[in-house]
Amino acid sequence: MLTLESARRYYPAGADAVHGFDHIERVYRMAERLALEEGADLEIVRAAALLHDAQGSLSGAEERLDHHEQSALFAGEVLAEEGWSPERIAAVQHAIRAHRYRDRREPPQTIEAKVVFDADKLDVLGAIGAVRVVVYAALAGQPTYAEPSRQFLETGKEEPGEPHSAYHEWLFKLRNVRERLFTDTARAIADERMAYLAAFFERLGQEMRGEA
C-alpha cells in the first residue's frame, strides 16, 4: 500500500535540496488539508502528492524539465502493481502531469488535480518559500539579492550579464503564484503566505542597501 513512509524510497536522501522528501511531506499534508476542505477524492490526491516528483527531480538535471511526465508514467507502474483500476490511475496521472507551474499544456481539470497543483504551489510561499528560493538561487550559482534592471522590471527578461537572484524570482514568479491557484482554500492560505514573503524581500532589500 502506498503511504507517506513507503514513498520515501522514491526520493533518495540528498538528491535534491529543493524537491526532496521534505517537500513531498509538506505537499502531502497540504493536499490532504485542501482535499478535505474542497471535497476531493483523498486516495487520488494522496497518491498524486506522493508521486508527483518521483522521477526526474535531480537538482540541475535536464530531466527536471519533463519530470511531471516521467513521474506520471512511474505512478502508473506503481499503482498498477497495487491493483488500482485504469480509471483511477489515469486520474492520478492527470494530477501529476498538471502540477507543473511553467507547463500549461495540460491544465488541472479535476478537483483532485487542482488540489495537488495548489498544494505544490503553496510550498513556494511563506517562510518555506523564502528558504527554498534562496537555496534554489544558491544551487544555480545566483545571488540571494540583486537590484533588477529596468528591462527586467518591465519585461521579466534580464539584461546581458544580469543575475537571476532570489529577489528576481520573487518578482518574476512567486508574487504571481496566488493568481494561478484554483481553490478558495488555497487562495486564503496564500494571502497570508504572500504577505510574509513580500515583507521578507522588502526587509532583505533594506538590509542589502544598509537602510535597516
Image: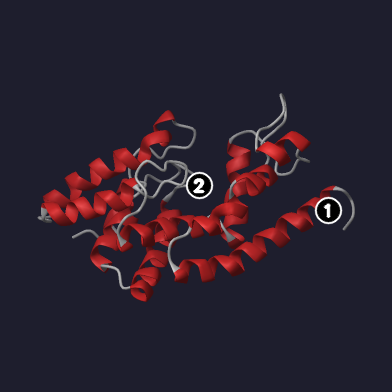
Mark 1 Cα shell of 10 Å, populated few (<14), some (14-19), many (≥20): few
Residue at (45% x, 55% y) in the render: 23
Quarter of the figure with the C terminus: bottom right
Q: Is residue 119 above or below residue 148?
A: below
Q: Is residue 123 visible?
A: no
Residue 49, quarter of picture = bottom left
Q: Residues within 10 Å of mark 2 (few under 14, many from 20)?
A: many
Residue toward you, 156 or 210: 156
Chosen colour scheme? secondary structure
Q: What type is the residue that disc 2 sits on?
A: Val
Q: Position of residue 90 (x, y in %)?
A: 20, 50
Instruction: For mark 1, give the secondary structure.
Output: helix
From this view, report whether residue 31 is shown above or below residue 177: below
What percent of the width, then of the height, locates residue 117? 40, 56
Which of marks 1 and 2 precedes in the sequence?
2
**Residue on which disc 1 sits:** 207
Label 2 vs label 1: CA separation? 25 Å
The residue identified by callout 2 is 18
Horizontal and vertical percent position of residue 167: 69, 46
Can you name the residue that lies furthest to the top here?
Answer: 160
Decide: marks 2, 1 in contact (CB < 8 A)? Answer: no
Q: Residue furthest right?
A: 211
Q: Is residue 47 visible?
A: yes
Where, by quadrant of the figure, is residue 6 drawn?
Answer: bottom left
Q: Residue at x 30, y 59 (%)?
A: 110
| Picture residue at 32% right of the left edge, 55% below the top | 109
Tell whether 169 sits left or right of 150: left
Determine whether the residue tagged by mark 2 lies in a helix, strand or loop. Answer: loop
Q: Residue furthest bottom?
A: 37
Q: Quadrant of residue 45?
A: bottom left
Of residues 94 and 12, the one drawn nearer to the viewer in this rendering: 94
